[in-house]
Structures are given as structure tokens and as C-alpha cells.
Amino acid sequence: MKFAPLKQAQTMKFAPPKTRLEDYEKRRGAFLKELIASTPNVSLRAKEFRRWIEKNSPYSANDPE
């Protein structure tokens, strides 16, 4: 009985590349500044910011990579 050779396990990438993370931080900061300037309601601002982070986070599950 012959067995197929074992393939090396793929490792998960937990941290994105540094440049991608820096880009995300710049975009997040710009979005937050604009959100603070345009939305006086703090509760609404927090909901919108959480939505943006969930959609754009480099650690999110909907990451295309």
C-alpha cells in the first residue's frame, strides 16, 4: 500500500505587510476626520466608524487575499 506524500501545511498570514497596514491607518485617519467634521451625532458616528472598520480592516474575513 502506497501513500501520497504529505504536502507542507500552508500557514495563515496574521499580519498584513507593513506598507498595507500604513496605508490602512492613513485611510482610517482621513475617514475619521471627515466623519467627525460631518456627523455631529456621536452614536451615529460610532456606528458608521465601526461599519467602515469592518469593511476595510486588513484583518477582516472578507479580505480578497
Image: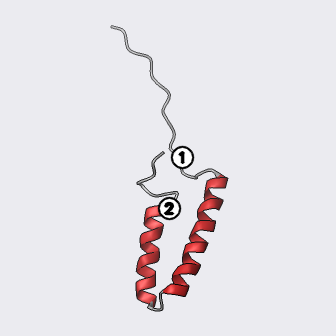
Q: Which corner quadrant of the image does residue 29 belong to?
A: bottom right
Q: Quick one: which residue is furthest to the left in this view?
A: 1
Q: Is residue 47 above or below residue 24?
A: below
Q: Is residue 55 above or below residue 49?
A: above
Q: Is residue 25 above or below residue 60?
A: below
Q: Quick one: which residue is furthest to the top in this view?
A: 1
Q: How is the image coloured?
A: secondary structure
Please, what is the three-letter code of the amino acid marked with disc 2? Ser
Secondary structure of the residue carrying tag 1 is loop
Please, what is the three-letter code of the amino acid marked with disc 1? Lys
Residue 6: x and y in percent read 45, 22
Q: Position of 10 compared to 4: left or right?
A: right
Residue 53: x and y in percent read 48, 68
Query: Could you tell me which residue is drawn at 44 percent across and 17 percent down?
Result: 5
Q: Position of 40 compared to 18: left or right?
A: left
- Closest to the observer, 60 or 31: 31
Q: Nearer the viewer, mark 2 or mark 1?
A: 2
Q: CA distance from mark 2 to mark 1?
A: 14 Å
Residue 52: x and y in percent read 46, 69
Q: Which residue is mark 2?
A: 57
Q: Which residue is mark 1?
A: 13
Secondary structure of the residue carrying tag 2 is loop
Query: Could you tell me which residue is drawn at 59 percent across and 67 percent down?
Result: 27
Query: Could you tell me which residue is drawn at 45 percent across and 58 percent down?
Result: 60
